[in-house]
Image: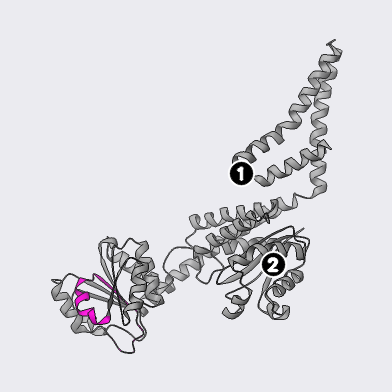
Amino acid sequence: MTIFALGVNHTTASVDLRERVAFSPEQLHQALARLRADTGVQEAVILSTCNRTELYCHGNVSSDLLMGWLAGYHGISAEQLQAHSYSYEDDAAIEHLMAVASGLDSLVLGEPQILGQVKQAYQFAKNQTSVGGVLERLFQQTFRVAKTVRSETRVGENAVSVAYAAVNLAKHIFAELERATVLLVGAGDTAELAAQHLKEQGVARLLVANRTLARAEAVATAFGGQAHTLGELPELLPQADIVISSTASTLPIIGKGLIESALKSRKRRPMLLIDLAVPRDIEAQVNDLNDAYLYTVDDLQGIITENLKNREDAAAEARSIIKEQTGGFVAWLRSLDSVDVIRDFRQRTEAMASEQLARARTQLQAGKDPSEVLEELSQRLTKQFLHQPTKLLRDAGANGDYLTLAVLQQLNQEDSK
């Protein structure tokens, strides 16, 4: 029995290929059933996100068979897929899954969203009865490892995108960021990401100014802000404690004169201006003004580089945790060898029987009624034999562990034949 991980991700395949091998939510139900039927794997989980598609399987199968199945399902050549994919077995597959769930294999090192995506993939497969005892234990241990990595290392800390770095900078300068008025100039992807981070920080008043009002309205509506056009900047700037600009303009759209006028209206209350645009949106001369604090994308890049280095150092700690936990899981997996399990089970039950038989013989030698001795022997053996299964049944029922309940029910049915 082998555990396999096979797939493609942002480091091995282009967006075009990743799109072609992705599974839509509507496909997953049929895909899981076909994967098990076509390849013979006992258990399977399919993880499909914008940056990766991966199969996690347990059973008697080969990576070539899984590769052929994935290629065939999506109608592409196995040779093309093989050139842009990866596959792992046993220790390496376990370690890979734990690294993925911990954010160590992501486009942005340490990003937290992937753990939720792995949990969703596992839960979907479990609901389709595609997860058995081995993958159940593997994914549960993986979730515990990811939580440990988050709590015991700094792999998820510090800004590693310009939008997040900008918001993080604003947070450090404004102790009560939720009370600040923030003006986003531009409504592209960077501005939208900044808006998301600002919302997470509790900013109550968000102004969005863009060349086209419709796009400004789309971002403002999504994050509870107010939409404006760039023509309204002279009226908006005096209201803004923080300005984050990220347009595609080829020339600066916020000059020294505009900020000077805004500061006069604000009665010299300071303004933080963060220019994320290349070419720049805000004239460099703004830095000459008192009470105006201008940061460019180059200033933030230094912060990001340092933070990324800190994350990489933390990732080394995380991989050490994962390697240790992988070893523990492999040891458990090897303990499942059926010959050893049968031998241990027989030895345990024979030891219990011998103990109770010796007790019965002592009672007979002492002159106790043989029928009473046999009755007591029967009761004691039954009680001992049923103690552990009964405990397992109670715990499984309390925890909703339907897999264990099903196995014990099957044993009961077999015994009754």
| Mark 1 residue crowding within 10 angstroms, few (<14) / some (14–19) / many (20+) | few
Give me the residue at 54% from left, 69% from top.
106
Image location of residue 246, percent across then percent down: 35, 79
- Residue at the spot of label 2: 88
As drawn, 387 above or below 76: above
Q: Residue furthest bottom?
A: 250
Look at the numbered discs 2 and 1 and tell me whether their residues touch, using CB distance below 8 Å.
Answer: no
Q: Does residue 21 appear to the left or right of 301 in the view shown? A: right
As drawn, 417 above or below 32: above
Image location of residue 300, percent across then percent down: 37, 75
Q: Does residue 113 appear to the left or right of 259 in the view shown? A: right
- Measure the alpha-carbon separation of dots 2 and 1: 32 Å
The amino acid type found where label 2 is placed reads Tyr
The amino acid type found where label 1 is placed reads Gly
Q: Residue furthest top?
A: 367
Range shown magenta: 230-252
Asked which secondary structure carries label 1, the reply is loop
Image location of residue 365, percent across then percent down: 86, 13
Q: How is the image coloured?
A: one colour
- Residue at the spot of label 1: 400
Q: Is residue 245 one of those drawn in magenta?
A: yes
Residue 345 in sight in this render: yes
Residue 186 in sight in this render: no
Between 310 and 279, the one lying in front of the other is: 279
Q: Quadrant of residue 388?
A: top right
Q: Does residue 315 appear to the left or right of 53 in the view shown? A: left
Q: How many marks?
A: 2
The quarter of the picture where the C terminus appears is top right
Q: Is residue 232 one of those drawn in magenta?
A: yes
Give me the residue at 81% from left, 43% from top.
342
Give me the residue at 14% from left, 74% from top.
265
Q: Does residue 38 appear to the left or right of 396 in the view shown? A: right
